[in-house]
């Protein structure tokens, strides 16, 4: 993971929680565009960046409820990272759940992860 390798916990923790979620969501949105089997490695790399950013977020919070929910959410992303096939529906649901964690980030949910029919 080279894209965020220079991102220090101090710098990351300087961002408001909602902005952290939006940046994680941005990586998830990138991965959503990589559903073709030929994109498996690029999608996996994107999930790896998501996991790294979530780890920084978890490590930087002292709010137990937030940490607990992010750890649960991280398990889902970890499963998608390990999966051999892309599950677009699960991915969209995970992105939506992430964005709904704060009122600020929730404003983007319908644009990037619309409610499933």
Image: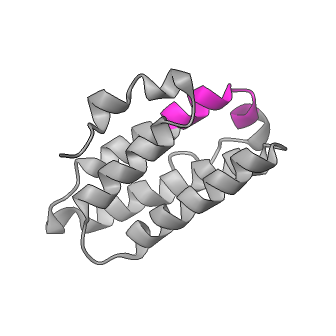
- Foreground residue among 64 and 56: 64
> Residue 110: where, in percent of width, then height?
30, 29
Q: Is residue 94 left or right of residue 12?
A: left
> Residue 74: where, in percent of width, then height?
56, 60
Of all residues, the one furthest to the right in this rendering is 62
Residue at position x 47%, y 36% in the image: 99
- Foreground residue among 35 and 4: 35
Residue at position x 16%, y 66% in the image: 38
Residue at position x 33%, y 55% in the image: 91
Please indicate, yes or no, whether residue 1 appears anywhere in the rendered image.
no
Residue 114 to residue 80: above or below? above
Of all residues, the one furthest to the front in this rendering is 117
The quadrant in which residue 86 appears is bottom left
Residue at position x 26%, y 65% in the image: 87
Q: Which residues are magenta?
A: 11-23
Q: Is residue 19 magenta?
A: yes
> Residue 35: where, in percent of width, then height?
19, 58
């Amino acid at each position: 993971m080279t894209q965020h390798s220079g991102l220090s916990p101090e710098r990351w923790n300087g961002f408001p929680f909602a902005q952290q979620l939006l940046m994680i969501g941005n990586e998830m949105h990138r991965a959503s565009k990589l559903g073709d089997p030929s994109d498996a490695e690029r999608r996996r790399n994107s999930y790896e960046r998501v996991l790294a950013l979530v780890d920084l977020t978890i490590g930087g919070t002292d709010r137990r409820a937030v940490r607990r929910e992010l750890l649960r959410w991280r398990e889902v992303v970890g499963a998608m990272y390990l999966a051999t096939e892309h599950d677009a529906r699960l991915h969209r649901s995970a992105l939506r759940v992430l964005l709904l964690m704060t009122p600020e980030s929730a404003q983007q949910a319908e644009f990037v992860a619309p409610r499933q029919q």
